[in-house]
Amino acid sequence: MWAGPVARMDSEVRKDPKGVTVSQCHDVYEPDEIDPTEAGAGGRKNVRHGCHFVSEVHGRVHVVRVVGSLDWMTQAEFAELLREQCWEPILIIDLAAGHIDAAGTGALVLATEQARRRRQQLVLVATDPVQLAVMISTGLNIVVPIVSSEDEAVTWCERHGVPPWNAAPAPAPAMVRD
């Protein structure tokens, strides 16, 4: 009995020449680019698709850009990136160049809860009408601001009293003993 095709995903995390962390997955079902110099298992060529996350830190702001799909194949990698690297007070997740499915929406809900526990300000950037409709239907827009660009996210943070990009951390309150 044939069980169907076997999916394989390899994940690679690397730093580009500017020091920006880029996490990219390789999925045999979404071929955007074939590297003829690499031979995979069984003599087949490795197929690389364009789904990846770009993670940058600007002062007290961490920006994660989703390029490609935040879906069932990439949501675990996305969650790991947020858990391991995103500790700055402001977290901007930019979905403008990405696509999400139900698993990706679940990953955003998880990111929202994680940011709440860490006392981070999370701002989502989304421009796709379908993404916006999904976020509104799940109520995500009630607990997280959703804006149309990274610049608008920074402006939103400044307007609502969240420190701007390169602001120095606020001094710790003086300890008062009773």
Image: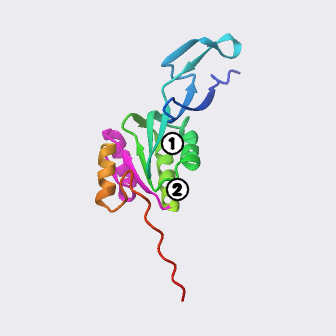
- Asked whether residue 141 is drawn in magenta, I would say yes
Kindly identify the residue that appears in the image at 51 percent across and 29 percent down.
17
Q: Give the range drawn in magenta.
A: 119-147
Percent position (x, y) of residue 89? 46, 56
Inspect the image, locate mark 2, and give the three-letter code of the amino acid beneath it.
Answer: Gln
Residue at the spot of label 2 = 114
Q: Quadrant of residue 68?
A: top left
In front of the other: 152 or 148: 152
Specify the label residue 103 is tagged with: 1
Identify which residue, 76 or 82, lies in the foreground.
Answer: 82
Element under disc 2: helix
Nearest to N terminus: mark 2 or mark 1:
1
Amino acid at the residue labelled 1:
Ala
| Mark pair 2, 1: CA separation | 16 Å
Image side of residue 101 versus residue 3, left or right: left
Q: In which quarter of the image is the N terminus?
A: top right
| In-front residue for pair 60/69 | 60
Look at the picture and state if 171 lies above or below 146: below
- Which residue is farthest bottom? 178
